Amino acid sequence: MSTTTVTPAPQPERTAYQGNDKLLLGLVLAVLTFWLFAGTVGTVAPEILRGINTEAERISAQQMNLAVSITALFSGLFTVVMGGLADRTGRVRMAMIGLLAMILGNVLVVLAAGVVALPLLLVGRAVQGFAAACIMPSTLALVKTYWDGAGRQRAVSMWSIGSFGGAGSAAVFGGQMASNLGWRWIFLVSIVVCVVAIMLIRGTPESRVEGAAHRGFDGIGLVIFMITVLAMMIVLIFGKQLGWTNPITLALAVVAVVGITAFVLWERRQAVPFIDFALFRNTTFTGAVVSNFILNGTMGLLIVSQQMLQRAREPGAQDAVSAGEAGLLSIGYAIMIVAFIRVGEKLLQRFGPRRPMMWGSMLVGLTCLLLMPTWVMLDTYKVLAVVAYAVFGLGLAFYATPATDAALSNLPADQAGAGAGIFKMASSLGSAIGVAISLAIFTGLMGSNSLILGSTVTFTGVQDNVALRQAGMVVMIWNLVIVLVAILAIALTVPRGGGNRGAQPMAASAAPPAQLPPDEEKRAILERLSGLSVTELREAEKHALLGELVRLDPDELRRIVEARRR
């Protein structure tokens, strides 16, 4: 049961240390160990299966699907917990723990072979997800703590490029590494990058929130949530293989249903819940979180289309597509998401969050349509894939910043931290569950001898892969459906111009003013104060000093008073 100890409010951090390029490089490399290296598995999954199953089948396609999804799952489950722990125990320490955990996860994945291939691969991927949950919040907090002004903006941009750029480049990088050196080299290089990041971050002064209130940890809620989500994912991934009426499948389905019910009931009784459902009374926050969960789930279309291209021909065939070639087709995704992420920010400032969120979602829907015609010849589909991946990156770039702003700017200040944690969790869990569903549909249908589309579509070219192509088409149809749900959620919950549908008044303009960065806001306040008289400024200074006294520890305040009386 969670408990709460009331302590004085946390004091703002004061530090004379200023971040430098050495530290920034270390933080960016730490972020890349997850987004660039661990994120490659979806693309190189066929290569991993071929490599491990050379002598005998050690890992099935369904088990490989779990290995692909489990990293994002564990990242989503632990991000909120480890971010709060980093604030209390130290962000440098947490980043180091994350990097050491990433090294361990990489070693386990590299050693996955023979009869122990499956447990080593699954545990290694889970550890990579836990490592990401340590690295992501702690490194971002260090960026915001140790840089100011223009330097902070540059540092945040570099951190974002490591995150978005790494995710966008994962398919290209992973494909080239797997095709030219072998898939295990991806994780061997990641180990080296982890070591370099540790050396660059080592010696950085510790950063933590001094005097932070000790928030209770809802361990029971986390355990219930973890068991529920794992049961649901096992049903989704292994349901067809086990049999939908198999007692194990049915039992796991019951665990998932009972688990989510028990979780909601438990959370509503907690003073400090793992997920604060009260936040969802804010309709704009709800719409942003729901659409964020769904759009991250469409990452399945990227992974399925990459795998479909590689499986379209037998290895060694003249026109077979290697992991490297498939990855290169997605280079437009990486370019677009990095190049246009700031455009999403500008669209937010001009139109508010609703329209760019809708536009971004529509572009993701267009991606589904472009990848849907799997009946065409392979060379034609490659061209469609190049265009689709670029559109996908553009859509996510338009959506990302406005959705984040919609989720967090409409919450009270004392709920912003909890809201940010839920929003981040929705990203990771949406990706994990969405990829699992897409891969379950794909692997379930590609081995089927029946054409569920009947004679509706005529597949041209090679006919021995029609089931594979049909499976890919159904995945794209599924992703298009959930994108339409995301668009509907935005339309119903995010009002024009921002604000909250459940609160009055709403924003008066469709173009609310952009929030100033802290340094610019400080300059604006100083400009306003410059018009005050000296007497008024002295009074303002006196009030500021009184505020400092209120925040002092009672014992320290008593010593000051006693010294004054002497």
Image (cartoon, grey):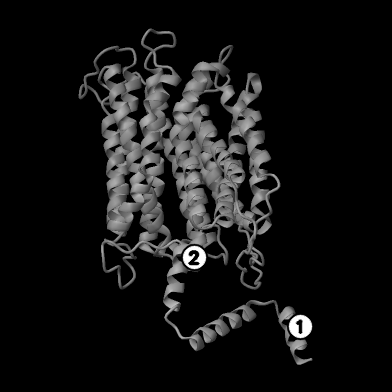
Residue 415: which disc? 2
Point out residue 208 in the picture as x, y percentages from the top left corner. Answer: 65, 58
Name the foreground residue: 355 vs 373.
355
The answer to which image quadrant residue 188 occupies is top right
Task: Give me the residue at 50% from left, 40% from top.
Answer: 162
Asked if residue 536 is positioned above or below residue 529 in the image, the reply reads below
Total marks drawn?
A: 2
Task: Give me the residue at 60% from left, 81% from top.
Answer: 545
Q: Is residue 175 visible?
A: yes
Q: Earlier in the sequence, mark 2 or mark 1?
A: 2
Asked if residue 121 is positioned above or below residue 197 in the image, the reply reads above
Give the residue furthest to the bottom. 565
| Amino acid type, callout 1 | Arg
The answer to which image quadrant residue 286 occupies is bottom left
**How dense is the environment of label 1, judged by Cα within 10 Å: few (below 14), some, or many (20 and up)?**
few
In the picture provided, is 499 more to the left or to the right than 65? left
According to the picture, the residue beneath numbered tag 1 turns out to be 559
| Amino acid type, callout 2 | Gln
Q: Secondary structure at mark 1?
A: helix
Q: Secondary structure at mark 2?
A: helix
Q: Is residue 261 visible?
A: no
Task: Give me the residue at 28% from left, 61% from top.
Answer: 511
Residue 462: which disc? none
C-alpha span from label 2 to label 1: 35 Å
Asked if residue 544 is positioned above or below residue 375 in the image, the reply reads below
Name the foreground residue: 348 vs 424.
348
Looking at the rendered image, the disc whose residue lies closer to the viewer, 2 or 1, is: 1
Quadrant of the frame with the N terminus: bottom right
Asked if residue 390 is positioned above or below residue 4 in the image, the reply reads above
